[in-house]
Image: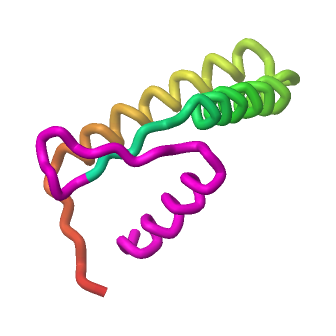
């Protein structure tokens, strides 16, 4: 992500009251981003909606299908961690 995109998104989150910038105590040139109460509330709402969506999507799945999903998901996470920890070769575009 380009720094200008981050700056633009951060400004929008500040304008809507979801975050504030605070001085970094370890680096006077830097700032930290802190969630406000409104930001914490928004995160909580997003988590609830995401959880409800997942419950709806899986409501008709059998216990065996859920078990298979769990096994495959754990395998995916393990493989991802293994590859994330290894050296990745990125080709220039």
Left of 34 or right of it: where is 30? left
Q: Nearer the viewer, residue 50 or 8?
A: 8
Residue at image position (85%, 28%) is 56
From this view, report whether residue 80 is shown above or below residue 52: below
Q: Nearer the viewer, residue 69 or 32?
A: 32
Stretch of the chain drawn in magenta: 1-30
In this view, the residue farthest toward the top is 63
Residue 29 magenta: yes
Q: Nearer the viewer, residue 23 or 59?
A: 23
The quadrant holding residue 7 is: bottom left
From this view, report whether residue 86 is shown above or below residue 70: below
Left of 82 or right of it: where is 62? right
Whole-percent x, y for residue 43 in the image:
62, 33
From this view, report whether residue 12 is shown above or below residue 92: above
Whole-percent x, y for residue 79 in the image:
34, 39
Residue at image position (79%, 26%) is 52
Whole-percent x, y for residue 37 in the image:
59, 29
Placement of the N terminus among the 4 image quadrants: bottom left
């Amino acid at each position: 992500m380009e720094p200008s995109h981050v700056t633009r998104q951060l400004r929008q989150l500040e304008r809507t009251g979801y975050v504030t910038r605070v001085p970094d105590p370890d680096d006077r040139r830097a700032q930290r981003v802190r969630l406000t109460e409104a930001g914490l509330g928004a995160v909580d709402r997003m988590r609830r909606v995401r959880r409800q969506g997942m419950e709806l999507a899986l409501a008709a799945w059998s216990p065996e299908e859920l078990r298979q999903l769990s096994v495959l998901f754990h395998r995916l996470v393990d493989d991802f961690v293994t590859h994330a920890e290894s050296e990745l070769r990125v080709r220039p575009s």
